[in-house]
Image (cartoon, rainbow, N blue to C red):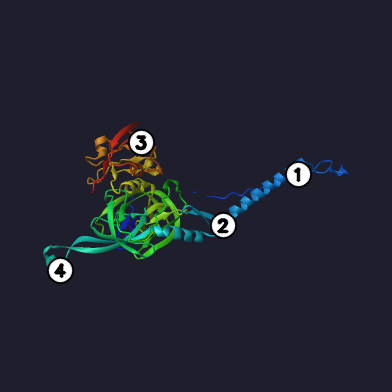
Amino acid sequence: MVATKNESESNRSYTVSSRPPVKTAGGKSISITVPTFRRPDMNRVKNPRPWGARSLLVCYLLAALIFGYAGAWLENQNAGVGGVTYATLNGQKKIVTSQSQLINQIAKTVGPSVVSVNVNITSATPSTNGFGLFGFVQPEQEQAAGTGIILSSDGLIVTNRHVVPVGTTSVSVTLNNGTELKDVSVIGRTNASSSLDIAFLKINNLEGQKLTPAIIGNSSQVQVGDSVVAIGNALGQFQNTVTSGIISGYGRSVQASSSSGTSSEDLADLFQTDAAINEGNSGGPLVNMNGQVIGINVATASGAQNIGFSIPINDVKGLINQVTKTGKFSVPYLGVRFIPLTSDVANEYNLSVSNGAFIAPSSDPTQPSIVPGSPAENAGLQINDIITAVNGTSIDQNHSLTALLDQFTPGTKVTLTVIRGNKTISVDVTLGSQPSS
């Protein structure tokens, strides 16, 4: 299966590797049967006694109970399609009468927090004329476009690193109201070997524009089947296109490569969604029904019907907090390549646990499982180790190794819980700073 990276007009594509990855709401209807009481000697009573206060009280209580359940039942019915639904958007409770109106409200609420990212990139390619005949390399300018999410009122933006790759010479952003701001710099980006495809931008001159930061949600609360909305700069020219769908899965890993096949990268711990994601949507938000960002759109699979991928926002929160506080970008670095465990992976490798980060043997000598000279090697981590926790927090479907490590800054000492053979040990590691390449 091939995954196409929804980058922009540069047509980057992703291939979902067939090898082991590297790296449910219901209503309740309650029926109440009120018993009919009949005295056995009722026909013999000529002058029945009037109801007392106690009997009246019982009747009132029964009536209240019946009407209470009836009201709850009606509310549940009205919460469906065509009924009344309450949504909290930007801290305000709003009433919507249908799913389409809810999506419309989300688009209006989140739209101002989404920008189009326009990029000029210098690429060195052999010239087809002049000195090119003698091997002279003539730099060429390419244009690309993607999407970004506003994080702060002073101009901090998060997007994908492949939207602003190495070689980017200039960046501009277009706001929801159509205003283009050209004084934009790249604060930093993860490197190509990182499973986290993230970059941060900063608008240096707002030109009097007032920015609306997005509301960041909690991706660990996301479940398969949850409704989501994707917003982005489709095809690099249709700004703030809105699509909707559900979360189809999580913990997905894909191997990404450009359409030319000249570069590839491994992405892990991704949400899978059937909300349509197109080229140019890269770096845009995947939001829940409360208008909160729970993912950053990164790729889509070609040759399939609406299979897209998004980075869980919790995997990026540590970096967002760091850049917001310091204005600098520095990624904590361990130096291992691992497979996020699932039941299927555990069965395939005959492992004793189904949660954790498995440092599997690498078949590619250029990509060792433990990077030489890295903090992981210095701490004594070994191939076939399974990292199950970081500082006591277990690695599971809601807490990836990447997300847990990104909560710390370079230079921080952390304790890893590791299964090695039949033993569980603790390994202290001082995190480094991610190399630029």
Tell me how far mark 1 sits from mark 4, CA to CA.
100 Å
Of callouts 3 and 2, the N-terminal one: 2
Tell me how far mark 1 sits from mark 2, CA to CA.
35 Å
**Mark 2, other Cα within 10 Å: few <14 / some 14–19 / many ≥20:** some
- Depth-wise, is mark 4 or mark 2 nearer the camera? 2
- Depth-wise, is mark 1 or mark 4 nearer the camera? 1
Say whether residue 41 is left or right of residue 310: right
Spot occupied by residue 163 in the image (x, y as percentages of width and height): 30, 57
Tell me how far mark 3 sits from mark 1, CA to CA.
62 Å
Q: Pointer 2: what residue?
A: 84
Residue type at tag 4:
Asn
Q: Pointer 3: what residue?
A: 391
Q: Quadrant of residue 299?
A: bottom left
Q: Which mark is residue 380?
A: none
Residue type at tag 2:
Val
At x 42% / y 61%, what residue is drawn?
242
Q: Pointer 4: what residue?
A: 129
Q: Secondary structure at mark 4?
A: loop
> In the displayed image of the protein, which residue is found farthest to the right?
46
